[in-house]
């Protein structure tokens, strides 16, 4: 069979999709990047917030049209939406042949071959449009969670995997699941309890990726700094980083999804001392007002966060700080937003993402009255982002004239004649990028590390010129 995959959501979900493709290829099937030519289409879904659910439903409906036209023989839905609404998807979309949750990754081989199937209930009318899923879920409440048990699956270095990112970087999932009970989050239910991979398994996979040409390794999990704690292994992440740092071929090792209570000094010391570990901290804090943090079920206060961030900067000179916030959480006041804005102004983050609160069933916050109107949520989001744009503009001006290492990613999505890349302080897909100027695009190759001088900026992006002695002959 010719198999195509459409993977939505976060890099952690992408790794699951890559593992499924690896299993499918090992079973003798072909893999194609063109879903319209595939015999079997896998839609690997996300269900974290309303927009993610709507995007996933859109993708399923689009792929269902391929099946109706006869170009697709089997449609398989996997991932978080499948874990969350498996019975509803089976009932509402008869075009779907198999629904597999997050803990059923190995079942993909049988699903593709047609040896496993999902019986359908009588069709009803929940998912006929992209927005119906949200209204239906809210009306039904917690009973919509169809998963029979919490997932326990965890892949290892021996598991087949087909990496779909550009050849010079790859995500490596070091753990699965989450033990926290944040009021707004459904992930522990969808992904199960936190479970770390064996350290030797992670190192073995990292070596294999480096041998295939991967130069940047991005470590991901629901809480990367919790790695090893579930096994009673204190200091496990710092030890892992030092082992990864010794792998030939890797240039950058980047950590994503850290947590404020599990960032220890030994991890910061490893980040500062290891040659290949990026001085980059991705720390979703969610808010700064103590009253909002308490209702969210998040640890800490604004003062505690400021002390933590100061400690990070002191122990890791030149570190890049990225965070995300949620505005419009039930009970959030204008005064709370004022405090969040003051916090952003005081800390001067390098990268900030702001999300409006999504009222999700099967979370503790679902029982809270959603008292912030949608338009007000958007206004609060824009206020914080407007503040951050000013901070970034000032930081970009201060960088002009500096020389820095840049990892070349390849042609710009907007123009094949313009090459782009990233500094150590920029992660793929979520951060800004470097746009190369005054150079022949053919002189730069994806995966190449060059010294470049920052000459200007446009919005969030930097403009840079490669130094002549760093260009390939």
Image (cartoon, helix red, strand yellow):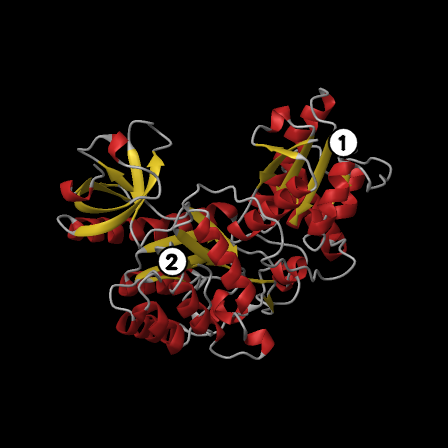
Indicate whether 315 appears above or below 348. below
Does residue 98 appear to the left or right of 270 in the view shown? right
When the figure is inspected, residue 307 is found, relative to residue 395, above or below; the finding is below
Query: In the image, what residue occupies the spot 42% across and 49% down?
Result: 214
Q: At which x and y percent is residue 342?
A: 31, 63
Q: Residue 349, located in which quarter of the rendered image?
A: bottom left
Observer able to see residue 368: no
The answer to whether one can see residue 217 in this image is: yes
Quarter of the image that includes the N terminus: top right
Residue 351 percent across, percent down from the top left: 34, 54
Q: Name the residue under label 2.
A: 248
Residue 392 coordinates in the image, percent (x, y): 26, 51
Query: Which residue is at the front of the view, 250 or 336?
Result: 250
Q: Which element is circle 2 on?
A: loop
Task: Name the residue carrying label 1.
Answer: 95
Left or right of 17 in this view: 464: left
* Residue 434 as seen in the image, left or right of residue 308: left
Question: Around disc 2, counting alpha carbons within 10 Å, would you say few (fewer than 14), some (14 to 19), or many (20 or more)?
Answer: few
The tag on residue 51 is: none
Image position, residue 337 (x, y; %): 40, 60
């Amino acid at each position: 069979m010719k198999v195509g995959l459409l993977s939505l959501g976060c890099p952690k979900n992408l790794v699951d999709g890559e593992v499924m493709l690896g299993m499918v290829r090992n079973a003798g099937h072909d893999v194609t990047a063109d879903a319209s030519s595939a015999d079997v289409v896998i839609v690997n879904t996300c269900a974290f917030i309303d927009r993610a659910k709507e995007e996933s439903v859109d993708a399923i409906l689009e792929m269902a049209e391929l099946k109706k036209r006869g170009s697709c023989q089997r449609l398989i839905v996997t991932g978080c939406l499948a874990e969350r609404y498996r019975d509803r998807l089976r009932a509402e979309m008869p075009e779907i042949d198999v629904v597999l949750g997050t803990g059923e990754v190995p079942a993909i081989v049988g699903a593709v071959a047609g040896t496993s199937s999902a019986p359908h209930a009588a069709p009803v009318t929940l998912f006929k449009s992209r927005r119906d899923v949200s209204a239906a879920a809210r009306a039904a409440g917690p009973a919509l969670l169809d998963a029979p048990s919490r997932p326990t699956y965890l892949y290892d270095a021996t598991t087949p995997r087909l990496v779909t990112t550009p050849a010079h970087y790859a995500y490596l999932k070091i753990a699965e699941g989450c033990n926290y009970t944040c009021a707004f989050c459904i992930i522990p239910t969808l992904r199960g309890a936190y479970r770390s991979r064996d350290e030797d398994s992670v190192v073995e996979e990292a070596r294999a990726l480096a041998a295939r040409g991967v130069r940047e390794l991005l470590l991901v999990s629901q809480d990367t700094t919790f790695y090893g704690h579930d096994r009673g292994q204190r200091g496990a992440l710092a030890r892992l980083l030092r082992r990864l740092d010794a792998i030939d071929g890797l240039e950058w090792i980047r950590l994503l999804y850290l947590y404020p209570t599990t960032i220890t000094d030994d991890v910061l010391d490893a980040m500062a001392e290891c040659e290949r570990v990026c001085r980059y901290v991705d720390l979703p804090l969610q808010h700064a007002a103590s009253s909002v943090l308490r209702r969210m079920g998040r640890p800490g206060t604004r003062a505690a966060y400021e002390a933590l961030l100061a400690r990070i900067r002191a122990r890791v000179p030149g570190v890049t700080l990225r965070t995300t916030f949620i505005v419009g959480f039930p009970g959030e006041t204008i005064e709370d937003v004022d405090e969040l804005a003051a916090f952003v102004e005081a800390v001067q983050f390098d990268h900030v993402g702001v999300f409006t609160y999504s009222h999700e069933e099967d979370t503790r916050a679902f029982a809270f009255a959603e008292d912030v109107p949608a338009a007000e949520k958007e206004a609060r989001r824009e206020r914080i982002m407007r503040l951050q744009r000013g901070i970034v503009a000032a930081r970009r001006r201060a960088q002009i004239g500096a020389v820095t290492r840049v990892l070349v990613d390849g042609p710009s999505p907007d123009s094949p004649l313009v090459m782009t890349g990233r500094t150590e302080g920029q992660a793929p897909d979520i951060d800004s990028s470097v746009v190369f100027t005054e150079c022949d695009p053919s002189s730069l190759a994806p995966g190449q590390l060059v010294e470049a001088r920052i000459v200007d900026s446009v919005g969030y992006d930097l403009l840079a010129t490669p130094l002549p002695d760093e260009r390939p002959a």
